[in-house]
Structures are given as C-alpha cells and as structure tokens.
Amino acid sequence: MLYDPYYRWDGRQFWIAILCFAVALPSVFAATRKNRLLNALGDLSYPIYLIHIVALGVMLPGDSVARYAAIVGSDLVVAGALCGVVVMAAGVHWLIERPVSHLMRAILASGGAARRTAAGVGKVPAEFPP
C-alpha cells in the first residue's frame, strides 16, 4: 500500500488490508500481552503524553534546538530529546503515578469503600484488590 498513490487508498487493497489487520489483532494481542518491555512502554505512554511539552521546553528552551543541531547534528538532538522525555516520564510514572494509584486502591479497599457500600452507593469492584 505504501507504493500506491494516495488517491488509491480507498480501494479494494486498502479494505482487504484493514480486514486482515482486524482479524489478526486478537492473536497479536494474545502473543504480546505478557511481554515486559511492551508493557513497560505502554505504562510510559500516558506520562509521556502528559509531560512531553514541558520536558522539551525544559531541555531545549528558546532557539537552542538550532544551536545544538548546528553543533552535534539534528539526529543527535532528536535522539537526546527523546531519551530525556522517556527518562522524565519514567520518573513521573514511578514517583507519582504508581504511588497515587496504590493509594487510591488502598482507599477503595479500606473503610472508605465499606462506608460507601453501607450507605448504598456501590461496591468495590473485584479488579481492585487490597
């Protein structure tokens, strides 16, 4: 499909490729769901989304991208920025996101959830173990 002009994308070949992808997706998920590297990258995707603009602004303020690119090359600037964003996102994930998630689960599993259940608000779902 990459070799066809863009105007031929809404043709038979495109829809066959989409159908094959949809049929293969459950088996791809089953084969990769226990991959630790992919799960770790998936855990970092949300923190990367949240902090990438701030992280890039801190690492490369103002017109520093052009200055750094002139010195070391644009490929190294992009690679360094990508590594920096991933490292910062990992820090946010391990220092903020995980502890807050554990705290929220503990609150749900503790007396707060019992009081809400006694008041008739709802029960703690089974997927939130203590």
Image: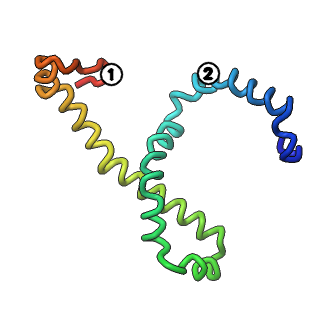
Q: Pick whichever, 92 or 9, lies toward us.
A: 9
- In the shown orientation, is residue 58 left or right of residue 130? right
Secondary structure under tag 2 reads helix
Q: Residue at x 48, y 46 (%)?
A: 45
x%, y% of residue 43? 44, 41
How far apart marks 2 and 1 lie (CA) works out to 22 Å
- Residue type marked 2: Pro
In the rendered image, the vertical position of residue 57 relative to residue 82, given as above or below: below
- In the shown orientation, is residue 120 left or right of residue 50? left
Residue identified by numbered label 1: 127
- In the shown orientation, is residue 88 left or right of residue 81? left
**What coloring was used for the rendering?**
rainbow
Tell how many labels: 2
Secondary structure under tag 1 reads loop
Classify the position of the N terminus by image quarter.
top right
Q: Quadrant of residue 30?
A: top right
Q: Residue at x 30, y 18 (%)?
A: 126
In the rendered image, the vertical position of residue 14 relative to residue 6, given as above or below: above
x%, y% of residue 80? 55, 66
x%, y% of residue 19? 74, 24
- Residue type marked 1: Glu
Q: Quadrant of residue 51?
A: bottom left
Disc number for residue 28:
none
- Counting other residues with Cα less than 10 Å from the Cα at mark 2, is it few (<14), some (14-19), or many (20 or more)? few
Classify the position of the C terminus by image quarter.
top left
Q: Residue at x 37, y 48 (%)?
A: 93
x%, y% of residue 102? 26, 36
Q: Residue at x 46, y 69 (%)?
A: 57
Residue identified by numbered label 2: 26
